[in-house]
Each structure stands twice: as structure tokens, then as C-alpha cells.
Amino acid sequence: MAGRQLRASQQSPGHLHGTLPSPQPSLGHQWLSKAGPWPLGPWAARLLAPQPARPPARPPVRSAAAGSPSAPTRPGPTKWRPAAPVSRALALPGRGRNLRAAERAGTGGGFRAGPAGGWAGLGPAAMAEGSAELELFRRRWREELAGGAKRQRREVAAEPAAGLENRRSAEPSEPGYLALARGLLDGGAPPAPAFRSPSPARPAEEPAEDGDGDGGGDGDDLLGQLIRDLVSRTWKVLAEDEVLWYRLCQQEGYLLDTSISDYSCWKLALKNCRARERTLKTNWKNRIGAVSQLQYEQGKILCDVHSCDGVVIAGYTSGEVRLWDTRTWDYTAPILEPMHSPGDAGPQPHVSFVKINSSLAVAAYEDGTVSVWSLMFGREPIHRYQHNQRIQALALGSEGAAVATASGFEVKVESPNDRGFWQTTETFEIQKLVNFLNLVPDVTGSPVTVAAAEDIVYLLKAEDPGKILHSVYGQPVTCLDVSAHEAAFGVKTFGWLLNEPNQILLYNLETSQCLKKMGNSIGDFTCVNLRNSPPNMLVTGNKDRRVRVFDLRRSESLCSLYAHQLGVSAVQMDDWKIVSGGEEGLVCVWDQRMGTKLWEMHARHPVRHVWFNSHSLITANVPDEKTPRGASIMDDDLTAHRKHRGIIYAYEFSVDQLAVESVLPICRSSYDEVTGYNYNIGLAVPYDNI
């Protein structure tokens, strides 16, 4: 017989084999017509058309040798060969579920089934005729899957149990259409018609393996798989977007001075920056890195130290000013030469104060002279001016070129004009001697100066000279620091006399109003750091041996750290650590959140300067006594004065630092320099070269 005929026999008890029943075409047409507003194409109509009745086939009789002895005449299926390869829809995972869906499919989607579960498909001509309808099916398949599967589940649930078997044999549309959708997803082409070997019919009361038994699970799984694929593609596009990773890198504070074209993979750049930050934090906590001593023996005794972005300036009693650039580890520092007048024949005066920013270096001398150097134009000063009395305070703007000095009852501000010539911008007369002086950062126009003179705090502007910011008689100011919009200073109250503790006051520079009063300490506040602290944070040091961190939003202390026996002299903090220096010469590094000390270093003389960034730390121990007893400053052998000189330490915690550079300079020296001394030669043994 032709390939379109099928031989099969019923295997269920109580049924006789016979002619294939004609399927009901209305179910498939009605289901597809409800799934969307589009009309059916010729290929889809042919797929869903009712099949003509087949002539009855004579069932073969199983031999007694092959059958069971108890039922020797029971009919059974014959062997057959498939007319086409097995469809990809039936080869997907969940084989049992797909088989049941195929058995319920009937003639839907271009397939028809006999009572025994045999399959027959359309010919190649019909499949070729439907190529024009593929695009239409591609546009419609998602809506039909989502809506049709739900309707089918509702219809199956509403039908009586008696007609369930008939519906399984007559339902033509959903599984075949699902197979078509799977074929389109897998390979972009409709599935080829295929036969499947017959399988024994499952009893009606046997539970379905997939748990629902309504055939809608296949559509839900297929739709969910597509949604997951679409979401995965969207995330992949986002994950490979260089602009997005560049903005994330900028938002987290990495590589701020770069453009998007500087790196080909910003995701990798952000990953490396985060890894480097974690390594730096670990090195900070475990004191892993290089340490060097910045010394200048011919300078005699250290007078003052300041630093900016790793560049250190130091002034000595010999009148010399020296620079170090720790960013390149080049400690052969240049000496800034002062401008000599015709009458300067004797020794140079001592250096009183030094300041440095990104472009200028300033030094004030004991005789009232102020010298200004440019870091780009050699060792000769670019400006010099003179006070009649000893200079009491020196201030340099964090950015720009503005210098403020206080001498006697006068505060003078110097800055260059539009043509580059230095001139005296403002001169202010005040009532008392100045103890602390600061220039307000990020100010446009004329410089703004904040000066603390005993118990009065002045806000000095060109348009409003002599404005008093704070004044309480008998309560002197003990420390001062300013930011772009606020000023913080410590006030020494009457103490036990009026039962009023010492406090930190926070003022707004624009409104001149007191914003906060913080602290409740018997000791004097000796240092405060507002400019370099995180937003809404403030760190202070006190004579009561404690370091306190304040939250400006709550006006209360977040933590109090006890360490320095003689009082705190310098502090700085960031978002996770605090570095403090004491009068006894101890430098402590704290974990702010845990409130614990990570490590400490000790040196002779009080700590007067502390500065750090993400990868380096600079500390300076400056002696109070500039002319110690029993030590002749004119001696040729300066080794006798080492304990009186003071010292500067530079710590480097960068991961890029070489292992050989983590050794002290005295240990890696060749001992052939005339300016060095080898009395610590025992630190380097065995000797490489002497």
C-alpha cells in the first residue's frame, strides 16, 4: 500500500481495531482563530485541514511463539519504518512529556495520529509551500503560546472526565504548533514531519509525569526559556558596554583624569583598581611596604615640615630649605636658595615656617623675610618681601598663588596680578597677636583669610576688613582649620570655674553663624582636621591623650581613641583609618570602624606633621629645642647632634613598590658617599661593597 496508509491495532481492552476515525477539524481552527486577529495562511490551513478516512487495515496476528501463552490471539502492532527523520521537537529533554503531547496532538500542526499512536506527515511539496508563512509564524508565536496555552488548560479543566480520551485524540493544534515553535527556535526552520514508533497506551487513570497533565507545561517552559534567553542577551549587551564601565569607574573615584579612549576594556580597568585598593588596604593594616628617612645633616636642626601630594619641604636652623619628591623615590633633593640682599654677609637666620602646594613653596625666616619659589622655575625665589617683626603665622592657599603672613598686629596677603607681578593684595590691622592663620580654599576673586588671635577669630575679606567671626573674652582659641564653607576651631573655656568643658565650634563662613558645638573635654583641643576629613566628619586631638571623631550631622563623638601619653599633636583621617601623632613622638594608625590600633612607630621629638593618601604616609618629628645645650652647632662632626635634629619618615604601601626598596636606605647604601656616615654599618651584613 502507499506510504500514507498505516497499520495499527488497538491495544486497550474493550476496543476493536478498525478504520481511523476522522478528526474534528473545528478544534484546531477555532483555537488558532482565537489566538490572534490574523487570518490563517494556506500552509497553516493545510496543516490543520481534516484528513480523509483511511480504509481499514487488516491487523496481523501475533504468533504463539512470540506472544504470551495466556493470550495467544491478542492483536499487536506490526513493524514499520519511519518515512522521515524524527522531529527535533521530540528529541528535546522531557521525552515522556513530549510523547504524551504528541499523542494528544492528533492532526494539528501537520501531523495525524492513529489509534495506536502511529504518525504520518505531510510531503515535501506541502512543506515547501509553507515557506512564505514562516515570518508570519515567527511574529505570532509568542502571543499564541502565552494566550492559547491558558485557554487550553481552562477548556481541559471544564470538560468531563469521560471525554478526556477523545479530546486527547482529537486535539490538533497546541503540541504541533509548539513543535513548530521549537523548530523555529532551534534552527530557524519548521520541523520536518516524522514518524514515531508505537508505544503501549497508558491507562486513563495513570498520573502524568509532568504533574499537570494538560499539555500547557511545554508552552510555559518554551516561553520561559525564550524570556531567559532574551534577558541574557540584554545583560550581555550591558556587561560589554564600555561607556557604562567608564562611568562606574569615575563614580567610584578611580582614574578621574583619564578619558574613555585611554583604556580598551574599562571593566578590566575597574577590576584592577578595586584589586589594587584591597591590596593597599591590606598593606596599610599589616604595615607592609617601604620606609625611608628624609635627612639633611648639613641643615642641622629641623624647624618645620609641610607636604603636598608626596612632595615634602623642610626648613632648618641653618637657614636652608630642602625639597623631597617621594613620588619618584628620588631623595637627592634640591636646596631652595634664598634671595640674598647686599647686607647679608653673616649666617642665615633660622627658618620659622614652610608651606607648599602644587605649584609654590614658601618659607618664612626669623628676621621677618618671606621667600616664594615656583616649583617649575628652578631654585631661585620668584618673590620676596619683608616684615618689620618676627613672623607669627604663615598660610598658603591649597590651589592658586596667594600667601598670607601675620607679624605683630598686621596680616598681609600677597598674590600675583594678571600680568604675573607679585603685589600686596590686602593688609589688615587686628587688635591682638595672631596664633593661627588659614586661607579659605576654592575662593574666586580676592583671597579670604581666617585668623585666630587669642580669643578672637577674624574673617578677613577685601570688601569687609576686620570682621569678627567669634569672640568670647577669656576663652582663647587652641586650634584652627578651615574648609571651603566652614571653619572649625577649639576653644578653651573656664573649665572647673564655671563647670563648662572645652569644645569644638563649627562656623559657616558665608552666614557667620555657629552651626555646631561639639566635645565635652577637660583638656584643651590641640589639633583639628576638617579640610582633609570625609564629608560631614571631623577629627580632633586633645591634651587628655584622646583622638575623637565627630559626626557633624549629630554633633556627637563617634569614637574616642586613647593612645598618646603626652597629648595629641597631629591627626588626619579618611573613610576607614586614622593616623595620629603625639607629643611623645609616637605615630599610631587606627582602624576607625573597629576602634583598634593597627600599628605604631616611635621616634624622638614630638610629631608636628602627619599627611597621607591612599598609598603613602609622611610624618615629621620636629624638636622643640632649636639650640640644645651641650651641643656645639659649629662642630664639623654632625653625628653628635643626631638625637637633636629631628627626622622625617616616608612610608610607601603601594603594590608596585619593588622588594629591594622596602629596605632602609642605610642598608642599601654603598657607603661611598661623602655626606653619609657608616656608624650603622652593622645593619647590612654580609657586606657587599665597602
Image: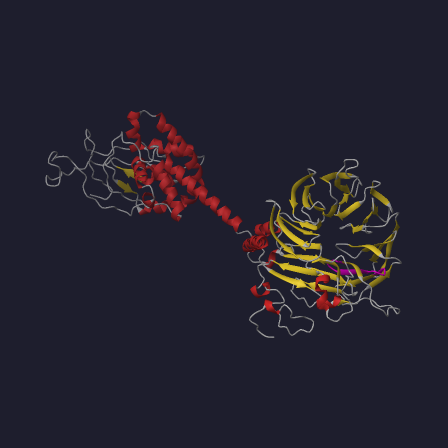
Q: Residue 511's image quarter?
A: top right
At a point 43% along the width and 35% down the height, the residue shown is 146
By what rule are the colours in the image chosen?
secondary structure
Q: Residue 295's image quarter?
A: bottom right
- In this rendering, position of residue 19 left or right of residue 147: left
Q: Main secondary structure of the magenta part?
A: strand
Residue span colored magenta = 355-369
Q: Residue 96's image quarter?
A: top left
Vertical side of 678 occupied by 185: above or below = above
- In this rendering, position of residue 85 left or right of residue 298: left
Nearer the observer, 301 or 22: 301
Q: Is residue 466 magenta?
A: no
In the rendered image, the residue lying farthest to the front is 630
Q: Quadrant of the N terminus?
A: top left
At a point 65% along the width and 45% down the height, the residue shown is 561
Percent position (x, y) of residue 646?
Answer: 71, 60
Percent position (x, y) of residue 246?
Answer: 59, 52
Q: Is residue 33 visible?
A: no
Count of labels in the image: 0
At a point 59% along the width and 44% down the height, the residue shown is 594
Q: Is residue 641 visible?
A: yes
Percent position (x, y) of residue 637?
Answer: 73, 70
Nearer the observer, 446 or 81: 446
Nearer the observer, 3 or 283: 283
Percent position (x, y) of residue 598?
Answer: 59, 50
Vertical side of 357 occupied by 333: above or below = below
Vertical side of 281 occupied by 319: above or below = below
